[in-house]
Structures are given as C-alpha cells and as structure tokens.
Amino acid sequence: MNFQFDLIEDKVEFFEANNLKTLQKKIESQIDENKAIMLGVHSVSHQMHVNENGQTYFTAVVHFKKK
C-alpha cells in the first residue's frame, strides 16, 4: 500500500457580515484553523456596501498560501 500526501498550496475564502467586528472575528478564526494545515495569509481584499436603507454590509476575500 502506497500513501501519498498532497499539501494545499493556495486557498481562497470568502467572508460576509453585517458589521466589521463580526467580519474580523470570522477571518481571525479561519486564520487560526488554516495555520494547522500550514497556510498563511497572502492577501486580503474587502468591500463595504450601503443599501438604500442605510444598512452596511461587509465582505472580504482572503487568499491563503503555503508557508
């Protein structure tokens, strides 16, 4: 029996929240989980949208790469 392990080299994850603090907590939680599989943050991109009722909506894209 022959075992072969392939490591994940790149991973892109998307996050969304109604406020910036919640978005930050979601991203930080995923950073900790990805450390276990040897991935570090390569880049972060984020946006904020305000709808016609004045409510804000935050999104982020985080690119993780192998350390």
Image: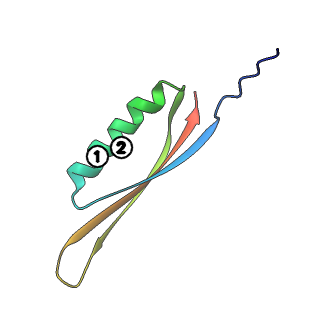
The amino acid at mark 1 is Gln
In the image, taking residue 15 as reference, residue 4 lies left or right, namely: right
The image shows residue 53 at horizontal and vertical percentages of: 17, 82
Secondary structure at badge 2 equals: helix
Q: Are marks 2 and 1 in contact (CB under 8 Å)?
A: yes
Residue furthest front in the image: 1
Label 2, on which residue?
27
Label 1, on which residue?
24
The image shows residue 48 at horizontal and vertical percentages of: 31, 66
In the image, taking residue 19 as reference, residue 44 lies left or right, namely: right
Residue 11: image tag: none
> In the rendered image of this protein, does residue 53 appear above or below residue 34?
below
Q: Residue at horizontal 82%, vertical 14%? A: 1
- Report crowding for label 2: few under 14, some 14 to 19, many 20 or more residues within 10 A (C-alpha): some
Q: CA distance from mark 2 to mark 1?
A: 5 Å
> In the rendered image of this protein, does residue 26 appear above or below residue 4?
below
Q: Residue at horizontal 76%, vertical 22%? A: 4
Secondary structure at badge 1 equals: helix
